[in-house]
Image (cartoon, rainbow, N blue to C red):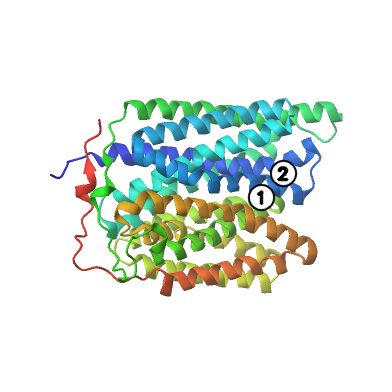
Amino acid sequence: MQVEIRKTPVFISLSIGLLFYGLLSTLTSVVILHLKEIFGLSYSISALIHLTFFSTYVIASIPASRIVKVWGYKLSLIIGYFTTGMGCMLFYFGINNQSYALLIMALFVMAVGSTVLLVVCNLYIVLLGDYKRAAARLSFLHSFYALGCLLAPLYASSWIKEQWGISVDMDMDSYITTLSLYIGTPFIIMSNLMYFLTVIFVFLNLPEFDTQLLKPWNKFEARHKKIHVMHFKQLRLGAFAVFAYIGTEVALSEWLVTFFIDFTYLYWAGYVAGLLIGSILLLRISPRKMLLTYAIGAAVLLLFAILSSGWTSLWAVSAVGFFNSILFPTIWSLSIKGLGRFSEQGAAIMVMAHVGGGIIPFNVVNFAAAGGYKLAFLIPMFCYAYIIFYAVRGSKFLRNDDVELSTLRAIKPSK
């Protein structure tokens, strides 16, 4: 029996959650610049902080998928928001006590909570309706994430720092103390916001999904006597595409935050615009064609930035944000498409691939130190080349025509 559900409250609640997640993830990038001063870190070593954060996705993804499978989507969202809020609070105390060990622990806890949220939110939106429009739904929802990323760098503006009284003329002790409060305050605010969302989801009536009712769409060879989640080619190759995309996005946005903070706003403004326009186009154009078009656009702009110099190069990198926008939602929807009872495991594999956000920027930083950023940007160029390959070939699979394509029968009333 099909279950009638009210999708509007679900979309509103998840969009608010993604807005806060965007604020949090970009705030982390912004404050890493100041952690170098507080803890005396080199730029290369400070990049390891991001590697620590994103490496947690590898550790926590499979347990997160098990939580979703056993306890359901609603309780998993509650756990995710509560854990993220706890990590933000620990981050605040770690900064204000200038405890590097507590800071690393806080990043780990935040990443665990974020892992659960990413597994649940993205998969939930994919399953909540027709697969043909999954990429469009994800793109629209991720525009709120991008909005959070756009707003977060405003906190690093000179005007905000002036309000805090941060000045290079201060003595070192006062400077470090004020800087610690400046960094820690938004995290204690984010902690309270995450706890607020936790309470909201306790009372929100969310439909649950039982993906065990769904058969995979893929046609498998006879040699696969027992199907495993890694037998899905579009998932395997899609995980590498997400690895490449996340790494490239973090590397480019961090480069702008570090050296040209004013251009960061242009990058994320283009990102928001790209998602909103892309979500409309995806209603009429296939995700594979959109992915190919946007990936080629991003690659061409980045190549132009490498070959040019000065302001022209900066504008080109900033404009990449527009074309980066729909890469993640389209790759995700194409990779998860038709996994059936393996959907939660597939979502976990996709979230594990977020470790690219730590590995690729770390390598970009070290290549830049050796030969400059023109050379380092060749790494993202290779990433875009792979994403183009995924759009053309990697996302294709043979469909079993005997399998019903509806997902509505996976919906059951919440308890």
* Callout 2–callout 1 Cβ contact below 8 Å: yes
Residue at 20% of width from left, 56% of height from top? 406
Q: Position of residue 161 (x, y in %)?
A: 70, 34
The quadrant of the picture occupied by the N terminus is top left
Q: Position of residue 79 (x, y in %)?
A: 44, 32
Q: Position of residue 3 (x, y in %)?
A: 17, 41
Say which of 219 and 351 sits in front: 219
Residue at 47% of width from left, 29% of height from top? 82
Position of 68 with respect to 300 (left or right) is: left
Between the residue at mark 2 and the residue at mark 1, the CA separation in whole angstroms equals 9 Å
Q: Position of residue 415 (x, y in %)?
A: 25, 30
Picture layout, residue 337 above or below residue 178: below
Which element is circle 1 on? helix
**Amino acid residing under circle 1:** Val
Which element is circle 2 on? helix
Disc 2 packing (10 Å; few <14; some 14–19; many ≥20): some
Whether residue 160 is visible, yes or no, is no
Position of 202 with respect to 189 (left or right) is: left
Q: Which residue is the site of mark 2?
A: 33
- The label shown at residue 257 is 1
